[in-house]
Image (cartoon, grey):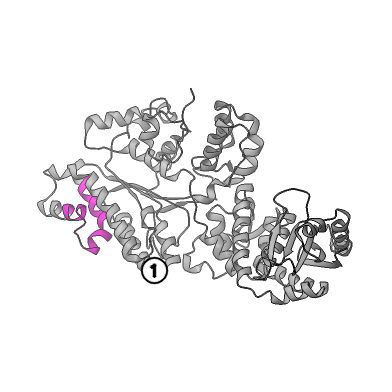
């Protein structure tokens, strides 16, 4: 019997004790101790193992105040790579009080609600350490404030300074400095930006971090994780010892996400090696430093599906776990230049961007490059290569894999559907009824210039695009036959009344702009040769017109023909 896959399990103890399959990332501990960073900010896309790695650090370093529990935690690491590294590393096990705080719960519609969730998360961490209240080294005054914070009865300033205060109490009780672990630090900030209370949240997070990380004499070291790089000036004010490790860095590059060796080993264990090429095409493509990395969440999800069905199709699993607000906003705000850049990326092209090390959400739309930077750091783009020019780092960026390309395409299609619904297409229907093919082409071309196209799946895109436009009429019913694969015409448009008009539309995609006219004629000819009108005639329609439509990128050709 194979070990179960840890889908959605992010607690290191649960994974080990429950016998889940675990990809050994404990050498992260060694590198952390070797490099001796005081405050370490790790930036990786969502669902790349940040939470599990922090959980692992907690169980390795934490002195729980309970000798028996400390010994139990040590057994979790038996057989793992860190235990092969010698006493220099083993001596740190169970040696420090640990503060472990996640900020992911602060994704709320108002500041009051978000602050309430953060307050609860902080209070829960205080409650986890209530054992220290029996320690005689803690003053009665501190015990009183400790309990007020744990009971969620303290003031705003007490919560904004809570991490420093908790580290002080823990250090005094244990006689050792405190390790601070903060997960998903940027979730409250991202949410606040899109919800309209960014400045309020920045003030709170800045105070929380400044007191805990800047001048905290009780801090051994801190590890913070997030997705986006937020300016030091806005959050980490004056924090000179901050060590930022982004996807650009070669340090720590293999500890978040799965390497190809790890993926092949997993696929061999579950006996699904035959699907490796699909796994690679869909979920590989990230480059952290110089290390090739797969999306671990998607790999595990696809392995789960493959283990029960070797023929299982891949899915964009990541789309349901990662916020796509930035993509949606990018598409909604895109000017003609940006639309062209997106189309280049969707066509497997690349985009050269200058890397900005420190940006804020407020800077996101200050320039196109800021926005591309955000997409890069959040995993929607990856590095193909990098170069140094005029004292700056430049990346040649691309879409990482099929999974992420699918997210772009689905977002574009949803945006396109919403945009089409706002348009008035009465002129198009009138031209269609009058047999004015030239006018139809002009109107369709105008829509094409305003949208974003992806040409590697051109037929489906253009078919969906045209179906969406034609479906806006209240006077006609639109039937798409593309999905059925039944050898019928692409699109049928018909009046609810059999006395009304009906139309048959056949769509072709041309290889060049010079082929447009001939391909529109071929589409029209196909309608007649395959007798697509017969279905409508059998229903009782007598007024039937036909249209052959061809597309090449942003150009369209329409040919009209009366029903025979």
Specify the principal SS of the magenta part. helix
In the rendered image, residue 413, in percent from the top left (x then y), is placed at 63, 60
> Which residue is rendered at x = 82% and y = 64% of the image?
546
Residue 26 vs residue 203: left or right?
right
> Which residue is rendered at x = 47% and y = 27% of the image?
3
Residue 352 vs residue 72: left or right?
right
Q: How many marks?
A: 1
State which quarter of the image contains the C terminus. Answer: bottom right
Residue 435 sits above or below residue 478 on the image: below
In the rendered image, residue 194, in percent from the top left (x then y), is placed at 45, 65
Residue 98 vs residue 8: left or right?
left
> Which residue is rendered at x = 33% and y = 55% of the image?
213
- The answer, for residue 506, to whether it is visible in the render is yes
* Nearer-the-camera pick, 184 or 240: 184
How busy is the neighbourhood of tag 1: few (under 14 within 10 Å), some, or many (20 plus)? some
- The answer, for residue 45, to whether it is visible in the render is no
In the rendered image, residue 426, in percent from the top left (x then y), is placed at 69, 76
Magenta residues (range): 146-170
Residue carrying label 1: 197
Residue 199 sits above or below residue 106 on the image: below
The residue positioned farthest toward the top in the image shown: 1
Residue 371 sits above or below residue 283 on the image: below
* Nearer-the-camera pick, 296 or 519: 519
Residue 426 vs residue 21: left or right?
right
Secondary structure at badge 1 equals loop
In the rendered image, residue 85, in percent from the top left (x then y), is placed at 42, 29
Q: Quadrant for residue 541, please give it.
A: bottom right
**Magenta includes 519?**
no
**Magenta includes 168?**
yes
């Amino acid at each position: 019997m194979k070990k179960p896959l840890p889908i959605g399990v992010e607690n290191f103890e649960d994974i080990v004790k429950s016998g889940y399959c675990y990809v050994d990332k404990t050498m992260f501990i060694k590198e952390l101790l070797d490099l001796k960073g005081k405050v370490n900010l790790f930036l990786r896309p969502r669902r790349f193992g940040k939470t599990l790695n922090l959980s692992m650090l907690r169980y390795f370093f934490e002195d729980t105040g309970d000798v028996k529990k400390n010994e139990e935690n040590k057994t979790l690491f038996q057989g793992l790579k860190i235990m092969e590294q010698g006493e220099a590393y083993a001596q740190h096990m169970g040696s420090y009080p640990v503060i472990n705080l996640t900020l992911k719960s602060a994704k709320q519609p108002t500041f009051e609600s978000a602050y309430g969730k953060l307050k609860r998360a902080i209070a829960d961490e205080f409650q986890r350490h209530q054992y220290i209240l029996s320690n005689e080294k803690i003053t009665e005054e501190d015990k009183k404030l400790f309990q007020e914070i744990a009971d969620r009865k303290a003031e705003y300033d007490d919560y904004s300074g809570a991490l420093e205060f908790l580290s002080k109490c823990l250090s005094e009780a244990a006689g050792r400095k405190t390790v601070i672990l903060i997960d998903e630090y940027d979730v409250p900030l991202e949410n606040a930006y899109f919800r309209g209370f960014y400045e309020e949240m920045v003030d709170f997070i800045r105070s929380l971090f400044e007191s805990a990380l800047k001048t905290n004499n009780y801090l051994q070291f801190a590890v913070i994780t997030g997705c986006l790089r937020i300016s030091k000036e806005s959050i980490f004010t004056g924090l000179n010892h901050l060590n930022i490790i982004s996807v650009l860095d070669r340090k720590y590059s293999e500890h978040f996400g799965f390497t190809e060796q790890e993926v092949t080993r997993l696929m061999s264990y579950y006996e699904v090696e035959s699907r490796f090429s699909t796994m690679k095409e869909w979920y590989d493509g990230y480059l952290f430093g110089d290390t090739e990395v797969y999306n671990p969440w998607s790999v595990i999800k696809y392995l789960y599906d493959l283990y029960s069905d070797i023929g299982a199709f891949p899915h964009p699993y990541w789309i349901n776990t990662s916020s796509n607000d930035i993509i949606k906003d990018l598409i909604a705000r895109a000017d003609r230049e940006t639309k062209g850049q997106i189309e280049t990326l969707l066509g497997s092209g690349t985009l050269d961007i200058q890397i900005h090390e420190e940006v804020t959400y407020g800077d996101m739309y200050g320039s196109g490059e800021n926005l591309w930077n955000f997409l890069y750091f959040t995993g929607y783009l990856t590095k193909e290569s990098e170069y140094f020019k005029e004292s700056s780092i430049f990346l040649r960026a691309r879409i990482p894999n099929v999974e992420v390309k699918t997210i772009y395409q689905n977002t574009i299609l949803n945006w396109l559907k919403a945009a089409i619904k706002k348009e008035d297409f009465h002129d198009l229907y009138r031209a269609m009824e009058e047999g004015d093919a030239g006018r139809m082409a002009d109107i369709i071309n105008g829509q094409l210039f305003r949208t974003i196209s992806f040409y590697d799946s051109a037929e489906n895109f253009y078919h969906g695009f045209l179906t969406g436009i034609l479906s806006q009429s209240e006077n006609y019913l639109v039937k798409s036959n593309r999905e059925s694969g039944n050898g019928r015409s692409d699109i049928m448009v018909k009046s609810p009344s059999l006395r009304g008009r009906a139309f048959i539309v056949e769509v072709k995609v041309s290889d060049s702009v010079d082929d447009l006219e001939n391909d529109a004629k071929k589409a029209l000819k196909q309608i007649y040769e395959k007798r697509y009108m017969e279905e409508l005639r059998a229903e009782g329609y007598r007024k039937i017109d036909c249209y052959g439509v061809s597309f090449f990128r942003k150009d369209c050709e329409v040919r009209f023909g009366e029903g025979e």
